[in-house]
Amino acid sequence: MSHAQERHYLEFAPYPWKDAAFLMLDTGLRVGELRSLEWQAVHFQPVRDAKFGMIHVRRDKSKNAKRNVSLSPRVRAMLDSRKASRESAYVFTEDAGTKPVSIWRLEDQHKRIRQALKLPADAVIHSFRHTFGTRLGETGADAFTIMKVMGHSTVVVSQKYVHPTPEAMERAIERLDAANQKALASLPGEKGSYPRQFPLQ
């Protein structure tokens, strides 16, 4: 989903799906993780050297699903707004406020928007998590980082989101060279340069 499509979609989306889709786009939570999300797992205050708050995902498909996911500034603002008007233990609830929101309700709301906007049939709820992973890969995040953030069981699953461009690979070599030069500069002797002549083998 492009950012233009995202904005158009969210303009049409009703609550609670609007906020739920927004959260998936910025955190990559699975729909099951989203539905079971409780306020006690949302930490608005940064921990130690972190800049943002986080969501602690405690359970879902596998042991790898247990993780901490950072809050983006716009997700934090959305959660702040929801918290101010909700007293339930769950972040997303049914109208009575006592149970997690039904998957059928979310599916129905998404289906109505998809039909109204004439989106393809494969634009499913999971597409929002997939969009998050794709955008994460486009920022240059490596497969292991994506695996940890998204709670994948193996790095093989995460690799599909990593598509390094020639420019990105060149920047990686530049960063490596800069790190090498910095390390050499800290050594005694000739500063910041390689040996003039390598020893013969």
Image: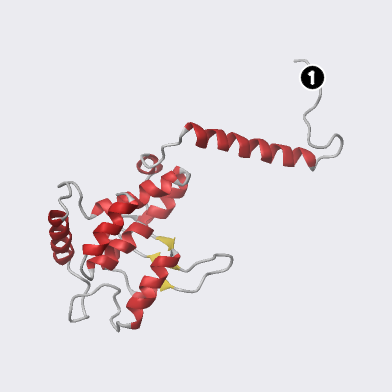
At x 45%, y 36%, the residue is: 164
- Would you say 15 lies left or right of 168 here? left
Snapshot colouring: secondary structure
Q: Give the quarter of the image for residue 138.
A: top left
Residue in front for this viewpoint, 101 or 41 = 101
Instruction: Give the number of callouts.
Output: 1
Amino acid at circle 1: Pro
At x 78%, y 36%, the residue is: 192
Residue that sits furthest to the top in the current view: 201
Image coordinates for residue 146, horizontal then vertical, percent: 42, 49
Residue in front for this viewpoint, 78 or 129 = 78
Above or below residue 44? Residue 11 is above
Above or below residue 91? Residue 60 is above
State the residue position of label 1.
199
Above or below residue 62? Residue 78 is below
Which part of the image, by quadrant, shows the C terminus? top right
**Secondary structure type for disc 1:** loop
At x 31%, y 53%, the residue is: 4
Does residue 152 show up? no
Image coordinates for residue 87, horizontal then vertical, percent: 30, 84
Image coordinates for residue 189, horizontal then vertical, percent: 87, 36
Q: Give the quarter of the image for residue 179.
A: top right
Image coordinates for residue 177, horizontal then vertical, percent: 66, 35
